[in-house]
Image (cartoon, helix red, strand yellow):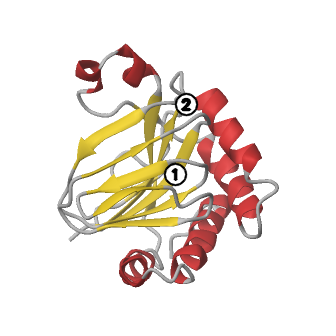
Amino acid sequence: MTSRDTNLQQVLDLSRGIIAHSGVSAAVAAGARVFGRLEHPGTEVAVAAERLPACQPAIGAALSGLAACPSPLPDLASAFAAVEAKLRWTHRRNSGTLGARFRDGHGNAMLIGPGGIEERSDVWVGATVMAPDITYPDHDHPPEEVYIALSPGEWWNAAMDWTEPGPGGIIYNPPGILHAMRSGAQPFLALWFLPID
């Protein structure tokens, strides 16, 4: 049986508990689909780790902000910090058309899925980081999505107004819904989970 990196497994275990206890029924159901599939590890891949300009200060600031939060957020921050060193951060596709400020102020990384440190096609687990005062543009995709906020920040979708869940809070986006997110005065960091059908 294939084993999984210890820190990555801890990120998944802690995230699973946060989503399962969120009280957001659609997120709980989506999380069950994601983590049920992840019970069997995929193929570990050696990724050429790379950080973008937004990563260094924003990730460190967001993770240090979790140190004083209730459990399990400090443990999640520590596990994610260890995993983050192995990730390849990339710009959103076509980010150059959205201006230099957005391009240089955000990054996405795949933990599990295409281009991630665990290769598989049935589930994606990733992270998004943004510098202060950046709006990630409206977008949509067929799979449903669950976010865990690891910093202050706001989310919007076509079925809800801008909402700030706070660190450890959950946002659920139904399949195909138009959605966006934005940072305020502080850097933004979030994990996202998509079951791929």
User: Disc 1 marks which amino acid?
Assistant: Ala
Residue extending farthest to the right is 68
Confirm or deny contact between disc 2 and disc 1 (CB under 8 A).
no
| Residue at the farthest front position | 161
Give the structural element (helix, strand or loop) at label 2.
Answer: loop
Total marks shown come to 2
Query: Real-space Cα distance between discs 2 and 1?
Result: 14 Å
Task: Choose between 137 and 60: the one closer to the eye.
Answer: 137
Q: Which mark is residue 73?
A: none
- Residue 25: x, y in percent? 40, 84
Residue wearing tag 2: 132
Query: Viewed as shown, does residue 145 lie left or right of 118?
Result: left
Return the x and y of residue 86 as percentages of the image width and height. Answer: 58, 42
Assign the C terminus to one quadrant of the image: bottom left
Residue assigned mark 1: 190
Considering the numbered disc 1 on the image, is that residue within a helix, a strand or a loop?
strand
